[in-house]
Each structure stands twice: as structure tokens, then as C-alpha cells.
Image (cartoon, grey):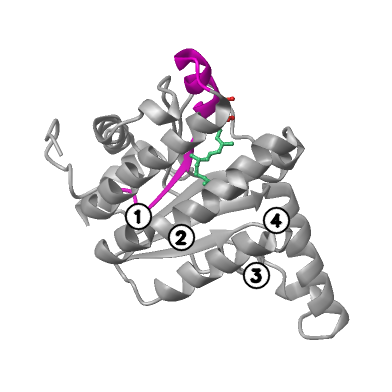
Amino acid sequence: MSDKNNNSLLRIPRHLAIIMDGNGRWAKKKGFIRSIGHKNGVDTLREITTACAELGVSYLTVYAFSTENWSRPQSEVKALMTLLVSSLKKELTTLMKNEIRLSAIGDISLLPAKCRRELLEVMDKTAQNGRMTLSLALSYSSRIEMVHCMKKIGQKLIEGQITISDIDESLIANNLFTFGMPDPDLLIRTGGEMRVSNYLLWQIAYCELYFSDKLWPEFTREDLENALIDYQNRERRFGKTSEQIAEENTL
Ligand code: FPP
């Protein structure tokens, strides 16, 4: 990574979240059907995942298919599910070679049986890999995640496993799909839109946001590095003052 400041490797985000937007527009621009955009999006995902593992990111969570995406034309949904199965089959080698554990967040019970089977198989085969966790957000929406979370907590209350006073931030975090993961430090969205689209809303409370105009299939390792350099030059205050942060950094 080019060293535009002297802390390039010190402040790599522990958890990077990405909204991979722009596949459809990229395909349209090139005169292809939308599914070709998604296919090229998988190539970008491979390049960025490998780069993240090499750069020392511990958790990479990508928005691959939202709950709202189920309402896209059935032909596109089908193409995405077929691509998911073929990509899982094809990418196992890359995941193993780079010691990447595959995980998933979202309501994966809604995926076609074939997708779910392939996903669970790759998750199982990569479970012992310890360099980085790649989480695919599949059939994911943050609000639905919160509904699931509240139902789980409600059930524990009814069963007497917890009382109202046990409900705190950590109980909520532990009942989200992302339990056990640190919150994202940086969220990158490609495709030029500036919104968070129902993605990890609880988890991004203190996350730095980075928007790129590049469409996902044309986003490169260099673009990723530029986003990381931008992140490294930000001051994360978590509600404190600059002076407090400076003092903490000298301790
Ligand atoms: C947004 O682009 C992207 C998606 C809905 C899917 C992202 C999926 C991949 C990169 C492939 C990997 C995932 C699977 C399931 C194999 P868009 O179609 O909304 O683009 P647009 O905004 O230009 O229309």
C-alpha cells in the first residue's frame, strides 16, 4: 500500500463493510444485460477480498443480496442465485488459499435449497480459516435483523431466562446476525449513491462512511487503498473531543 502518511499499516479497519453498488449500470453502460454486471461484480469481489486479507482486515462484510432485492424481476433474482451457487463452488480454492472463513448474515432460510446447501458447505469447509472472515449479507435487511433480534429477546423474557434489566446494548448486539463480530470501522459504498440502504444500521453507529463514484465492477485494489488512506486520515472521536483523543493516544 502506498504510504501517503506514516501510519498506513497501523490503522487498517478491523471490520470493513461494503455496499457493492453499480453492477446494473456498469452492464448497461457496456451494452450488456444486468446479470453480466453481477458476474463482473464477483471478479471485483474476489480482488477486493484478497486485497483485504493481505492488508490485514479481519472482517469483511459485503451486501450481496438485500431483502428488498427479492422484488427484482424474477429473471434477475434467478441469475443472482445461480451466480451465487457457481461462485461458491469456484471460489472455495481462493478462500482456502488465503485462509478466509466464509460466513453469512441475513435470513438464509429464504434462499433456494441449492444455494443454502452450497453456502453451508463452503462455510463448513472454511470454518477453521483464521486470517479473515468474509460475511455475505444474503437476504439481509437491517430492520428485519432488528425484528429477529427483538423476537429472540422477547422469547427469552417470556421463558424467564432474562429480565427487563438485562436488556442492554451488548444483549442486543449478541442477538443480531453479526453477533461475535466487532462493529464496522469503515463502510464503503460504490456506485455514487450516498445512502446506507437498510445495511447494518445498529452496527454502523460510529462507523466512518466512504462513497465512491466508481461502479462496483470497476472498483480496484487501488480504489480500496485510497479509501483506506482517507479513513486513516480521519479522527474518530466516538463523541469525545479532539483533545481527549489526542491525550488518549499519548498514553
Ligand atoms: C447492486 O448493483 C448489486 C447487487 C444487488 C448484487 C451484488 C452482487 C455481487 C457483486 C455478486 C456477488 C453476489 C452474489 C449473490 C453472487 P445493482 O444491480 O443495484 O446496480 P445498479 O444500481 O447499477 O442497478
The residue under label 1 is: 14
Q: Callout 1: helix, strand or loop?
A: loop
Q: Callout 4: helix, strand or loop?
A: helix
* Horizontal and vertical percent position of residue 153: 77, 71
Asked if residue 107 lies left or right of residue 4, the reply is right
Give the position of the C terminus as an image quadrant. Answer: bottom left
The amino acid at mark 1 is Arg
Q: Nearer the viewer, residue 144 or 81?
A: 81
The residue under label 4 is: 145
* Horizontal and vertical percent position of residue 170: 60, 67
Closer to the observer: label 4 or label 3? 4
The residue under label 2 is: 182
Q: Earlier in the sequence, mark 3 or mark 2?
A: 3
Residue range corresponding to the magenta coloring? 12-32
Q: Check if residue 23 falls in the magenta segment.
A: yes
CB at disc 1 and ligand 1 closer than 8 Å: no
Question: Is residue 12 at least partly visible in the picture?
Answer: no
The amino acid at mark 3 is Leu
At a point 61% along the width and 69% down the height, the residue shown is: 174
Q: Earlier in the sequence, mark 2 or mark 4?
A: 4
The residue under label 3 is: 171
Closer to the observer: label 4 or label 1? 4
Tag 2 and tag 1, C-beta contact below 8 Å: yes
The amino acid at mark 4 is Glu
Distance from Cα at disc 4 to Cα at disc 1: 22 Å
